[in-house]
Image: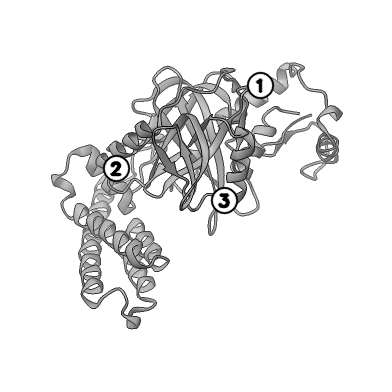
């Protein structure tokens, strides 16, 4: 019997029909009583090691079959002519939706953002974009309903820019055109990506976080290639009541191939073939940059993709300090405000890890500030600053 608690997932040879069986539940209860109850450090037997290895590879198949990505498209369509016609019809509907959206946004601006007669308008606009088969534009319209004042004005400007970019998508450079299509709502099949160019590297897991959404739980895993230095973001989903299958503990490193989604600022990737299981990473914190360099990296990402909300960076020698309008991360010369959406618990946990001294911090740098995700203490141990990250770190080793 072997149990992987990060899934959780298990394998037991008993004939019982109940899953998880009593043996799995018993081992999990014993393990939850304390780390000493289940001694670690021993090498798993061969059959258990093979099962763990296959479990790392399985997310690739899951991604192929994910309902988020749609049906498997690796094979050629049964009727390519009919598929081309459907694609042409959808492109025309999305273009018509983008034109209507621009008219609605302009009308909203002419009437003024404070017009009380427009309450509930964004829901109707989002429904129209769903009818136009443009889920990205629909999501943007829904987000406007929760914004007020300057934030709503900025959101309207970005959404109008996206709709205008789609109307001229054929004139854009291909990387930017790919970004626009993705933002509007066109999906790219992961199997098709993996069949193309991949990047093999030893990927260090910088952070992990679970975000419960309306009907799915999204897991975000940030990686950085130890050889290439490329950042990467893996996304996986699970239905309500279950956790995503892909679980890479923070601080571990995995030799694997990644395929990036086409974009002007490539970041999101899909996990391809892996070579072995995640191994302990370097004993020292990952190399980072100064605050000014982090802001510059985010600026370059926004210059390539104007709709990029945040960019992953590692800050070195960053200290938490109170500012006149909230907490700051400073390297003594420059400072970044903490993102207002940073949970209060994460702020205090970061303060506890640093102990008032500069530390290495991984997070996302965005227009609202820096959102910390993982911090490394003086001994080089990573600490997740969100509940999901802490769980992944603590339960990385199989029982």
Residue at label 2? 302
Q: In this view of the protein, can residue 263 be seen by the observer?
A: no
Q: Reading the chain from its start, which is encountered first: label 2 or label 1?
A: 1
Q: Quadrant of residue 227?
A: top left
Which structural element holds mark 1?
helix
Secondary structure state at the residue bearing disc 2: helix
- 10 Å neighbourhood of mark 2: few (<14), some, or many (≥20)? some
Left-right relation of 168 to 144:
left
Question: Measuring 52% from the left and 34% from the top, which residue is drawn there?
Answer: 319
Q: Position of residue 139 (x, y in %)?
A: 38, 60
Q: Residue furthest left?
A: 171
| Mark closer to the chain start, 1 or 3 | 1
Q: Could you tell me how far apart the alpha carbons at marks 2 and 1 are, in whole angstroms?
A: 43 Å
Q: Which residue is mark 1?
A: 50
Do tag 1 and tag 3 residues touch (Cβ < 8 Å)?
no
Q: Nearer the viewer, mark 2 or mark 3?
A: 3
> Depth check: 106 or 268 in front?
106
Residue 270 quadrant? top left
- Across and down, in percent, residue 26 comes to 86, 38
- Which of discs 1 and 3 lies nearer the camera? The answer is 3
When the figure is inspected, residue 163 is found, relative to residue 332, above or below; the finding is: below
> Which of label 2 and label 1 is nearer to you?
2
Q: CA distance from mark 1 to mark 3?
A: 39 Å
Give yes or no for contact between labels 2 and 1 (Cβ–Cβ under 8 Å).
no
Q: What residue is shown with label 3?
A: 343
- Secondary structure at numbered mark 3: loop
Give me the C-alpha separation between circle 2 and circle 3: 25 Å
Name the N-terminal-most of marks 2 and 3.
2
* Picture layout, residue 327 above or below residue 116: above
């Amino acid at each position: 019997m072997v149990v992987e608690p990060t899934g959780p997932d298990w394998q037991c040879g008993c004939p019982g029909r109940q899953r998880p069986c009593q043996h799995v539940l018993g081992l999990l209860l014993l393990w939850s009583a304390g780390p000493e109850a289940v001694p670690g450090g021993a090498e798993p037997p061969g059959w258990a090691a093979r099962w763990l290895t296959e479990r790392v590879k399985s997310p690739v198949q899951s991604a192929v079959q994910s309902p988020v990505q749609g049906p498997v498209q690796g094979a050629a369509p049964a009727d390519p002519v009919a598929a081309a016609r459907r694609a042409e019809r959808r492109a025309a509907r999305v273009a018509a939706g983008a034109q209507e959206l621009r008219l609605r946004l302009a009308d909203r601006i002419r009437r003024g953002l404070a017009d009380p007669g427009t309450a509930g308008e964004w829901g109707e606009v989002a429904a129209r974009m769903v009818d136009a088969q443009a889920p990205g534009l629909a999501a943007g319209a829904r987000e406007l309903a929760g914004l007020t004042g300057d934030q709503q004005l900025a959101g309207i400007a970005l959404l109008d820019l996206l709709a205008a970019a789609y109307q001229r998508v054929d004139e854009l450079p291909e990387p930017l055109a790919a970004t626009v299509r993705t933002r509007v709502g066109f999906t790219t099949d992961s199997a098709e990506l993996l069949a193309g160019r991949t990047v093999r590297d030893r990927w260090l897991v910088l952070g992990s976080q679970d975000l419960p959404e309306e009907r799915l739980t999204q897991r975000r895993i940030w990686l950085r290639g130890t050889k290439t230095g490329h950042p990467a973001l893996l996304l996986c989903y699970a239905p309500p009541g279950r956790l995503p299958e892909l679980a890479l503990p923070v601080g571990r490193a995995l030799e694997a191939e990644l395929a990036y989604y086409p974009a002007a600022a490539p970041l999101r990737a899909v996990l391809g073939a892996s070579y072995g299981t995640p191994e302990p990473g370097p004993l020292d914190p990952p190399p980072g940059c100064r605050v000014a360099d982090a802001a510059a990296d985010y600026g370059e990402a926004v210059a390539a993709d104007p709709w990029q909300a945040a960019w992953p960076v590692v800050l070195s020698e960053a200290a938490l300090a109170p500012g006149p309008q909230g907490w700051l991360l400073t390297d003594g010369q420059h400072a970044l405000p903490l993102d207002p959406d940073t949970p209060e618990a994460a702020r205090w946990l970061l303060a506890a890890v640093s102990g008032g001294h500069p530390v290495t911090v991984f997070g996302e740098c965005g227009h609202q500030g820096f959102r910390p995700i993982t911090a490394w203490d003086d001994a080089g141990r990573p600490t997740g600053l969100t509940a999901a990250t802490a769980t992944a770190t603590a339960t990385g080793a199989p029982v």
